[in-house]
Amino acid sequence: GENVEQHPSTLSVQEGDSAVIKCTYSDSASNYFPWYKQELGKRPQLIIDIRSNVGEKKDQRIAVTLNKTAKHFSLHITETQPEDSAVYFCAAMRSYNTDKLIFGTGTRLQVFP
Amino acid sequence: NAGVTQTPKFRVLKTGQSMTLLCAQDMNHEYMYWYRQDPGMGLRLIHYSVGEGTTAKGEVPDGYNVSRLKKQNFLLGLESAAPSQTSVYFCASRLPGLASLGEQFFGPGTRLTVL
């Protein structure tokens, strides 16, 4: 089955700097990769996703890149702000087996003012 | 529109006790999921359902049972709670089909402590 590894487990950056979180997946048939943000004490919420027919997707200060050959994808946050502090989870899914997402173990991002 | 709700929000059990966690959604979603979240372990899938009357095992199903008697409700049962089941439990739901891939809506979570 699918296995998703996520690094780093914690990340501290200064406000205004960029943050990058990386994930690798094992199942070459996976072709959908969402990212979730979970603020302290709250529920996970989808922030951006990418499908395997696209190499990069951007939404304001966040972007996701996908390298299908290497089986890894990354979340990039530019001009970080204190409100970006949260735990971020990557996930992977096969689109023809649309039952379930496999999540990474999460990255705790702290943005210091 | 309440989205996904969970009952209760907090619970403390003694080892061997049983309980049921209730998840309800008012978005007419076919798919529903139960996850547990432990420090450093991310979100691990316990059981899921792709429609009323159907259930399937996820990554960590042992010690749990589920039922989906109504489309809007998904129940998670612990028959004999163990300290290893201390965790935060999240329910989630989504529509089927490629268009809604990954857009899982999560409930607020239930914090369970087993002593």
Image (cartoon, coloured by chain):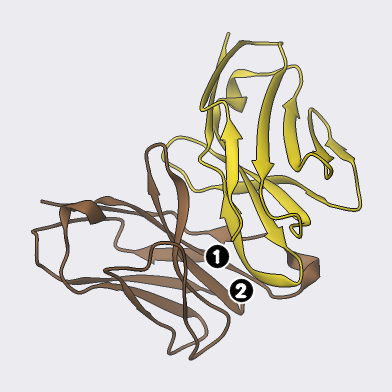
Chain colours: A yellow, B brown
Of helix, strand and loop, which one carries label 1? Answer: loop
Per the model, the C-alpha gap separating discs 2 and 1 is: 6 Å
Of helix, strand and loop, which one carries label 2? Answer: loop
Q: Nearer the viewer, residue B97 or B107?
A: B97
Q: Residue at x 17, y 64 (%)?
A: B81
* Spot occupied by residue B99 in the image (x, y as percentages of width and height): 80, 67
Chain ID at mark 2: B
Mark 1, other Cα within 10 Å: few <14 / some 14–19 / many ≥20: some
Instruction: State yes or no: discs 2 and 1 in contact (Cβ < 8 Å).
Output: yes
Q: Residue at x 58, y 51 (%)?
A: A3
Residue topped by disc 1: B3
- Amino acid beneath label 1: Gly
What's the mark number on residue B46?
Answer: none
Image quarter hosting the N terminus of chain A: bottom right
- Amino acid beneath label 2: Met
Q: Nearer the viewer, residue B34 or B4?
A: B34
Q: Residue at x 56, y 44 (%)?
A: A104
Q: Visible in this render: residue B22?
A: yes
Task: State left or right for residue B79 relative to residue B29.
Answer: left
Q: Visible in this render: residue B102?
A: no
Residue B2 lies, with reference to residue A48, above or below; the image says below
Lower position in the chain sequence, tag 2 or tag 1: 1
Chain ID at mark 1: B
Residue topped by disc 2: B27
* Spot occupied by residue A24 in the image (x, y as percentages of width and height): 67, 40
